[in-house]
């Protein structure tokens, strides 16, 4: 499982990688004073912390189709989560064993277990814990906990929904132009249905127009909608990544006088970190280019074939972008913490080496667990990741 250093990194993560159930449970208790509003029926889960992580299986391989798993971490002391705790990689069997262990019983309360298993499965069905991604996943599962658990202001929820609907509407118009239905009526009805995607029957005309296989259509379409949301996330991260890249290039100098071997080691770490950031960003830009080009091909040229082909790769792209987003988010958070500690002063050699070592863990080989047995960053172009700069690094 996680070592202590990696645990500290994850505890400082943002919503792409961390979902602090206990934080929201305390808010529910304070703001509603109604225990039935808690997310889980089992007490220890209401004070757990969920992480998204690359999980290596027993053959030391990472799944290509779904590279991210959900880790449930139960701190020994919720007030001091960094002091250690117990954790498991989510699946039904692991949850059953951990449930029995925590409740010190060989028997399982079937109703509570099944309910909590279903809730955890919703969290496990998405690659990040970004609030809007979580809210959409719960809505699609026809499960509606307190809005406190989604941590979205009404203004931001409206803005994000409008952003995604702005991508969805042209898609529906283009898909229906080749059908005989009443386009305007169909578009208005279908836009909200597609965003919340509760069943395939409600969007079957669109599934047929896009030539999708009915048995996988919901997962494919929800993945595409997730990608349109990641447009917002990556655009918001871009200024921070640019600033970090510039700091590494121009300002990462220590206050100490360095020996030649120390200077070379520092330069080697610097090149590695910046090179990995550049490599990962180039991959994101290439994925966004494909997304944008196929979207334009359908919306402006009526080319359903190219867009349908991209849709079939959406599940992989969605999880890939989510995993990379998590690493970039952790990287920028680590940098902000480092800068805050410096208080405008030049760092010591030891401090810079320690910082680069953290970034190397995040970017070189993503922190992995071994399995047991800003709102205004959106671009104006409606075609995709229009604000992503290819030469950011």
Image (cartoon, rainbow, N blue to C red):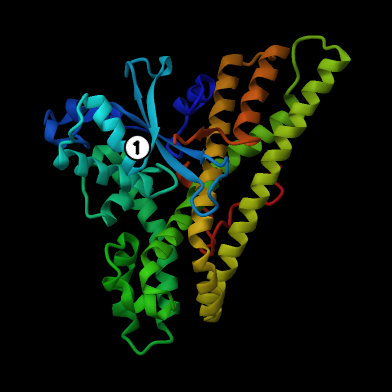
Question: Residue placed at 27% from the left, 66% from the top?
Answer: 199
**Which residue is more in the foreground, 251 or 140?**
140
Q: Looking at the picture, how far across and down is residue 184, in whole percent? A: 33, 79
**Which residue is more in the foreground, 65 or 57?**
57
Q: Is residue 318 visible?
A: yes
Q: Is residue 155 visible?
A: no
Q: Secondary structure at mark 1?
A: helix
> Which residue position holds label 1?
94
Q: Looking at the picture, how far across and down is residue 263, in whole percent? A: 83, 19
Question: Residue placed at 28% from the left, 57% from the top?
Answer: 140
Question: Residue placed at 37% from the left, 76% from the top?
Answer: 206
Query: For residue 18, what is the image quadrant?
Result: top left
Vertically, is 329 above or below 126? Answer: above
The residue carrying pointer 1 sits among few (fewer than 14), some (14 to 19) or many (20 or more) residues within 10 Å by Cα, namely: some
Total tally of numbered discs in the picture: 1
Query: With 168 as the anchor, is 109 left or right in this view?
Result: left
Which residue ends up furthest to the right in the rendered image? 260
Vertically, is 300 above or below 179? Answer: above
**Which residue is more in the foreground, 324 or 147?**
324
What is the quadrant of the C terminus in the image? Answer: top right
């Amino acid at each position: 499982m996680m070592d202590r250093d990696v645990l500290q990194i994850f505890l400082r993560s943002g919503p792409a990688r961390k979902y602090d159930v206990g934080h929201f449970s305390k808010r529910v208790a304070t703001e509603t004073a109604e225990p039935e509003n808690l997310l889980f029926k089992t007490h220890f889960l209401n004070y757990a912390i969920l992480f998204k992580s690359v999980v290596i299986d027993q053959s030391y391989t990472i799944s290509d189709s779904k590279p991210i798993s959900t880790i449930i971490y139960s701190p020994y002391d919720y007030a001091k989560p960094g002091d250690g705790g117990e954790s498991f990689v989510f699946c039904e069997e692991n949850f059953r064993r951990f449930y029995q262990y925590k409740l010190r019983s060989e028997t399982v309360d079937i109703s509570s277990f099944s309910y909590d298993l279903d809730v955890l499965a919703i969290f496990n069905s998405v690659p990040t814990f970004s609030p809007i991604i979580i809210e959409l996943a719960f809505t699609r599962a026809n499960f509606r906990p307190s809005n406190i658990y989604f941590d979205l202001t009404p203004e931001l929820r409206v803005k994000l929904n409008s952003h995604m609907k702005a991508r969805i509407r042209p898609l529906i118009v283009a898909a229906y132009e080749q059908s005989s239905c009443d386009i305007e009526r169909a578009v208005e009805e279908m836009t909200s249905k597609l965003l919340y995607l509760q069943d395939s029957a409600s969007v079957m005309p669109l599934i047929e127009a896009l030539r999708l296989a009915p048995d996988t259509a919901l997962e494919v379409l929800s993945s595409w909608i997730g990608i349109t949301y990641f447009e917002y996330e990556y655009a918001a991260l871009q200024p921070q990544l640019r600033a970090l890249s510039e700091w590494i290039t121009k300002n990462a100098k220590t206050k100490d006088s360095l020996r030649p071997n120390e200077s070379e080691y520092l330069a080697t770490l610097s090149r590695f970190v910046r090179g990995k950031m550049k490599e990962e960003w180039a991959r994101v830009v290439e994925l966004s280019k494909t997304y944008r080009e196929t979207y334009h091909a359908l919306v402006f040229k009526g080319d359903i074939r190219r867009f349908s082909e991209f849709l079939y790769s959406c599940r992989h792209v969605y999880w890939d972008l989510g995993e990379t987003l998590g690493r970039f988010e952790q990287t920028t958070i680590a940098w902000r913490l480092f800068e805050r500690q410096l208080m405008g002063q030049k760092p010591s050699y030891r401090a810079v080496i320690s910082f680069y070592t953290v970034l190397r863990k995040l970017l070189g080989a993503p922190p992995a667990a071994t399995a047991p047995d800003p709102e205004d960053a959106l671009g104006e172009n409606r075609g995709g990741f229009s604000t992503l700069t290819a030469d950011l690094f």
